Amino acid sequence: MRLRSSNPVYKYGDFTSVGGDTASYSGVVTKTGILLAIIAGVAMYFGSTLDFTGGIGNGIFTVILAPIIAMIMVILAHRNTEMAWAFSLVYAAAEGIFLGFISAIYAYMYGNDIVLTALVATFGVLSAMLFLYSSGVIRVGSTFRRFMMSALFGLIGASLFLFIFALFGGLSSQIGYSLYVGIVLISVVVSSLFLLIDFDNVSKLVNAGASKEYEWSLSLGLVVTIVWLYIELLRLIAIIAGDR
């Protein structure tokens, strides 16, 4: 069976059913937990070592390099499923460094409670989306996937426009700020809905008897979306905190 997904993390996968050990829900959950635990552990350790009192110049290289490494690991993991476990672990470590840096910045600017609030909100949304999918309230079909791809490309285009707009000082205006808030809100919604696609990918592959090695690919895809959701919720909560 071949599975096409809107989640970029599945772009390189050739999900073909084979004999032998097959993927299971418990296997995907376990591996997802492992990756999240690594991300959390590395983020907490790295974030605790940062000191922003003298500026953030020393961390700029890290915040640029870490996500690049993470992206490369995602591509490699889905080109070579036999080594997906290794690439996934490296991804988790790199993403942990990046999230540790980002979370530390927001905690420094808005207080430590913002990180905890974002974490609680992330897993709250994750639970809500899982309920909506498992109960059949929202069904993931080809139309839904195409719509989400369109929304993703639209969001990327709007973000690029906002970045260029910001280079010319546009964010200091009311229009620029409103545009930023709107993009963050849309990003939260889109990332939340992408969880439904991840759940559907897991369901289809497990039910089709995909090889057990694909559990790492499925887990990685889900973790990528969870991290994306966390970052967007962190930005949204920061906006709310800044407007008080």
Image (cartoon, rainbow, N blue to C red):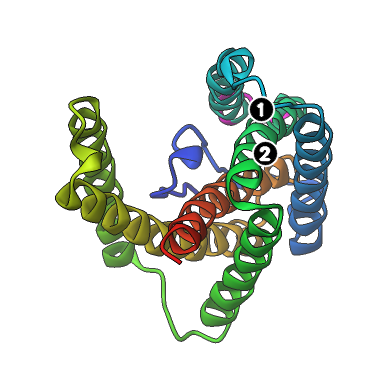
241 vs 101, left or right, is left
208 vs 162, left or right, is right
Query: In this rendering, is residue 164 above or below 43?
Result: above
Q: Amino acid at mark 1?
A: Phe
Q: Residue 185 versus residue 145: which sits nearer the camera?
A: 185
Query: In this rendering, is residue 197 above or below 227?
Result: below
The span from disc 1 to disc 2 (Cα, nearest Å) is 9 Å
Measuring from the top left, give residue 240's x and y in whole percent: 45, 64
Proximity of marks 1 and 2: CB atoms separated by less than 8 Å: yes
Q: Secondary structure at mark 1?
A: loop
Tag 1 residue: 52
User: Which residue is pictured at 63% across the width and 24% down the height?
Assistant: 80
Q: Residue 133 versus residue 121: which sits nearer the camera?
A: 121
Measuring from the top left, give residue 185's x and y in whole percent: 35, 61
81 part of magenta stretch = yes
Tag 2 residue: 104
Look at the image and tell me whether residue 150 can be seen. no
97 vs 199, left or right, is right
Write down the quadrant of residue 73 in the picture.
Answer: top right
* Magenta-highlighted residues: 78-82
Instruction: Name the dominant secondary structure of the magenta segment.
Output: helix
Q: Amino acid at mark 2?
A: Ala
